[in-house]
Image (cartoon, grey):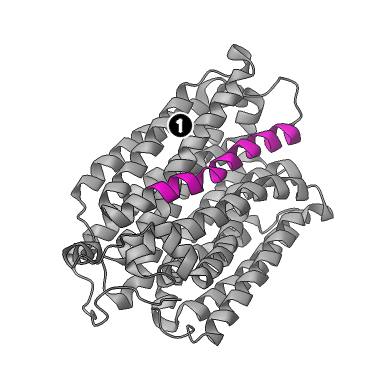
Amino acid sequence: MSAIIDTDMTDRRPLGRGDAKTLILSALGGALEFYDFVIFAYFAKTLGHLFFPPGTSDWVAQLQAFSIFAVGYLARPLGGMVMAHFGDRVGRKRMFTLSVFLMAVPTLCIGFLPTYATIGVLAPVLLTLLRVVQGIAIGGEVPGAWVFVAEHVPRHRVGLACASLSSGLTFGILIGSLVAAAMSARMSEAAMLDHGWRIAFLLGGVFGFFAVYLRRWLSETPVFARMRERKELTTELPAWVVLRDHLPGVALSMVVTWVLTAAIVVVILMTPTLMQTAFHVEPARAFTGGSLAAFSLCVGCVLGGLLVDWQGKARAMLVASVGLAASTYALYLDLRSGGTHLLALYSLAGLFAGVAGIVPSVLVAAFPPAIRFSGISLSYNVAYAICGAATPVLVGYLAKTAGGLGPAHYVGLVALVGVASSLYMMRKGQGVASG
């Protein structure tokens, strides 16, 4: 498994103004695109009642909506592999811009979509198709974004670069949470069902097109430009090279991606809704907690990246995995006993969900530059398709078991996988250097 971060292994320069501009524009564009992808989760309960037959119970409606939410994850490998192929062949920047455009269009369309009461069964069908297009877009966005920023910065700052991008992506979750919280506080349930939910998606469409505009100011990565100049680009199918020569890197990348899905999908995206349906927390308080957790996640991602550059990705992964399990159990135990410390404990769980800022460094280091986009895209998107699609449905069911602790049990199990991956990297001598 290659640990190459850049073709120039002697690059130890400090971060410059150009690097900062790239990181800021990439993170901001990613935040706006990720808002489009995750806003669906915050309105799952509302969408469940609007796009399925009337009279459906809250729990069944939520499960149906989470199922459509999960479809977006199943579509990720298709978009990821196509964009990664051209990203490794023609350039990172073009695919980086295309992905955000493909996200903006379906998000805007969802905002105008007729409901079940208007067009019947066609409503959930169209909603599912638009969710598939969103999945295709995000499948190219996330791996491409990590590769893009990692190849722009000095080797010893890859951890911070990837983490800042992840923080930007998760800032999109915070925006979604704040929008949901504000709308829940200011609008009645009837108004939300009538038109409120549309505002959130129409706003996302506007965000997406603004992100397209921002990416006009970005330049191709120095690593790709150097490979193109030296004629080092692979002439073989990049995905085939990944599977033929880099299976250990694929396996490790898929395992740590599973940890990331548990942190993001369960702790951040699903918990605000589960608070309401499983623990009967008021919507406004649940969304406030979700907003605090999302903000803590942004901070946790950056701290995770700094820890990677300081102590190495294996040790950083170990700390975050243990903290994720402990904080999630503390949160759900508190919810079961009445939620007295909900806001503080949810913020803590969000901080340790910052493992999402550590995982990209593991993925970037697993593949050499010529097939890096394809390697990350294949590993990350296939793992996310499997885990991300199964998790909402499985955890939605588990929320009714073990006295409400089912989701915490799931996160705890996956966190153990994170610990195992940390020990594996240490054994392979990857526990100190970030590269």
**Relative vertical location of residue 408 with respect to residue 421 in this rendering, above or below:** above
**Magenta residues?**
58-82
Identify which residue is drawn at 60% across, 25% down.
124
Q: Please indicate, yes or no, whether residue 182 appears anywhere in the rendered image.
A: no
- Report the front residue among 72 and 301: 72
**Relative vertical location of residue 304 with respect to residue 140 in this rendering, above or below:** below
- Report the front residue among 95 and 69: 95
Q: Kindly identify which residue carries mark 1.
A: 201
- Report the front residue among 262 and 39: 262
Q: Residue furthest front?
A: 236
Identify which residue is drawn at 46% across, 70% down.
245
Q: Is residue 429 left or right of 401 when viewed as pictured? A: left
The x, y position of residue 281, in whole percent, is 69, 44
Amino acid type at image mark 1: Phe
The x, y position of residue 220, in whole percent, is 21, 56
Residue 396 part of the magenta segment: no
Identify which residue is drawn at 66% across, 50% down.
391
Q: Residues within 10 Å of mark 1 (few under 14, many from 20)?
A: many
The x, y position of residue 359, in whole percent, is 49, 67
Q: Is residue 401 left or right of 286 when viewed as pictured? A: right
